[in-house]
Each structure stands twice: as C-alpha cells, then as structure tokens.
Amino acid sequence: MAAGSEEDYAAYYRFQCPRLARLRTSRAGEIVYDYAHSTEREMDRSEFYSDFLATLDLRYYVGGVLFRDERGTGIVGLQRTAGAGHVGEAEIRTMRALLPHIRHAVIVSERLADARRDADDLRSALDVLDLGMIVVDGRGRVQLANVRARELFASGALVLRDGVLDTGHRGSRSALGELLTAVLSSPPDLKAGRRSVALRDPTTGATLGVTAVRLPRQSERAASIVDDGGRALLLITAPRSPRSGDEIEGLLGVTPAEADLAMALASGVTLAEHAARRGVSVHTVRTHLARLKDKLGVRTQAQTAGRIRDLVPDLRPLRRHPNE
C-alpha cells in the first residue's frame, strides 16, 4: 500500500467504508463481496471507492467472516483492480472453499502465540528459582537452562561440549553419563524413573546434587516423526560462592567498612575480635555498628546479625583465624 494510506484509512475512510457496515451484520462463515451491498453507481459516489481505493488502483474485493465471538470479528479479503472486474461465481466458490482452512490457520496461529506466551511465563518463573534446571534431549544436548543453570555453566561447574551437557570435573563425567543413560532408557515415569548422583564442582570443590527424570513425550505422533531418544529434566542443587564485600555493599547499601562488619556479625565474630582483626578500636567498630543498625532498621546487635542472615541467606561463615 502507498505510504500513509493505512493512516488515512484508520483516521477517516474506515468510517466511510460500506464493506465494514456489511461485515458487522454478517455471520461467521458468510462470503461477502461488493455487489452484495453496493451497486456500481453507489461505489462511484462513495468516498471510500472513488477517493481512497482509486488512489491505490483497487476497486473490488471478495472476502469472508472467519469468526464472530467475544474477541470481536475476524475477516479476510482479497482485493481486485478495476481492470480485473468484479468477482464472479467461480471466485466466490473458491473463497467459500478456502474460508474454513483460513479460519483453521488463524486458530492454530493464535494457539501457537498463546503457547509461546505460556512458555515465556514458565521460563521467567524458572529463572527465579535458586535451583539449576536443565532439559536435555536423548543425546544429552541442552535444550533449556534457567538462570541458575547458566550461572553454573559460566563458572565452569558444568560445561557444554558441542552442545552436549558435561561436567567440568573429569572424575564426575562417567557418573553424569551413566545417570543420563539410565534415565533416558527408562520409562517416562516422573516418580519411579527418578535418579540422583553427586558431582564435584572443579572450581570450588563443592558437591553438586543432580536429580534427573525422564520426561514424557509430547505426543506419539511427534515421536513417530522425530525420535530423539526422549528428553530428561535435571534439577541441580549447588551452594553459591561466598558473598564478597562488594556484593554485600550493593545488597545492603552500606559502606565497605560496614559491609565488612556485616559479614563478621553474620559469621558470629564478636566486636572485639573484629576490631583486633582489622586493627581498629572497638569504639570505631561500635560506630560502624550504630550506622549499620540504622540502615537496617534494627535496634540490637543480635537483630543486626539476624537481619543480615535473612537478607543474604547464602552468606557463608568467615573462617576463624588459625590462632583463635
């Protein structure tokens, strides 16, 4: 269409369009065309035909009502130039034959759009979990990974080798491979088919707990078209790395000294111990504590430590000094 014609139609010509007036009263499945509601003389006197369509070198159409329900009215139409002439019985029969198939295509498109929205909502929900979640196909290729799982890939705890899930710890590779083989060869039973294994994180030495289960096929018809050996869901528990002082500053909105004290209090370190470690006076530490309590909205030292542990649940205790 010519530049600006859609804006012109929306702003003015749709109110002059006799086609819309007819379509508003038509039933779902009904075929519509110009001569069903207008004569050539009426079309010549219509601004919609003589001013709008003429500038686009268009004159006639044949269309149909796809649906009419709570969503509104869905229509489809084919435009013809003046030189092509008005549609005849053959074109009307063709539109009548095509209309159910077009309606079905629209329904499928809407359902796919709904499915995509549902999938996006599900991914967003899974990304909130502090549990790693990975879906692999029958060859171990990763099809889906939530945010926590992607963090494990980024840290090197898990790796991808040509798209296939693997562990960064050489000694754990056989265990992961045996787990996937056992799960993918088992019946798709979410309870009986569940298996677990412990892997080693090569970056921290921590243990990764992996539970896997075979997922049911989406449909037998899909399985007959593409047999990829099924799919498996892996749930991974992994301790997070200790929070750094910089992270605590950002999370709590405190100064570096206050963040250092916060980590100490959450770990059970006394004010005197903290002062000795940092080479400052207990009075200075108490000043930092007062500011920290004010920012956290608490009144006592015990409440401060509890609030910090609540706000930063993955904060690990500080290691005691060897001489303590």
Image: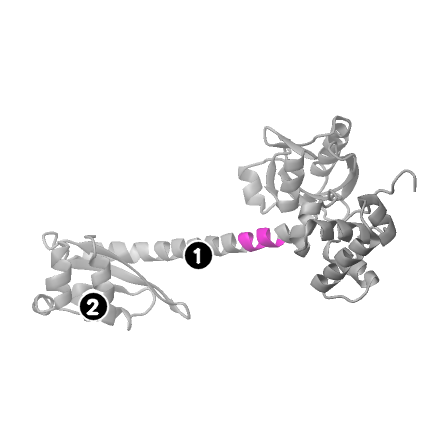
Residue at image point 83% right, 44% down: 277
Q: Taken as a whole, is the magenta stretch helix, strand or loop?
A: helix
Q: Residue furthest top?
A: 170
Q: On the image, which quarter does residue 134 sit in?
A: top right
Q: Is residue 143 magenta?
A: no
Residue 132 placement, left or right of 75: right
**Residue 68 in sight from this viewpoint:** yes
Distance between the Cα atoms at labels 2 and 1? 29 Å
Q: Residue furthest bottom?
A: 25
Comparing 104 with 295, the one in front is: 295
**Three-letter code for the amino acid on which mark 2 is drawn:** Tyr
Numbered disc in front, either 2 or 1 = 2
Density class for disc 1 (Cα within 10 Å; few <14, some 14-19, many ≥20) is few
x, y percentage for residue 243? 72, 46
Local SS, label 1: helix
Comparing 300 with 70, the one in front is: 300
x, y percentage for residue 122? 59, 53
**Residue stretch in magenta:** 119-125
**Residue 216 in sight from this viewpoint:** no
Q: Is residue 122 magenta?
A: yes
x, y percentage for residue 29? 33, 64
Q: Which mark is residue 12?
A: 2
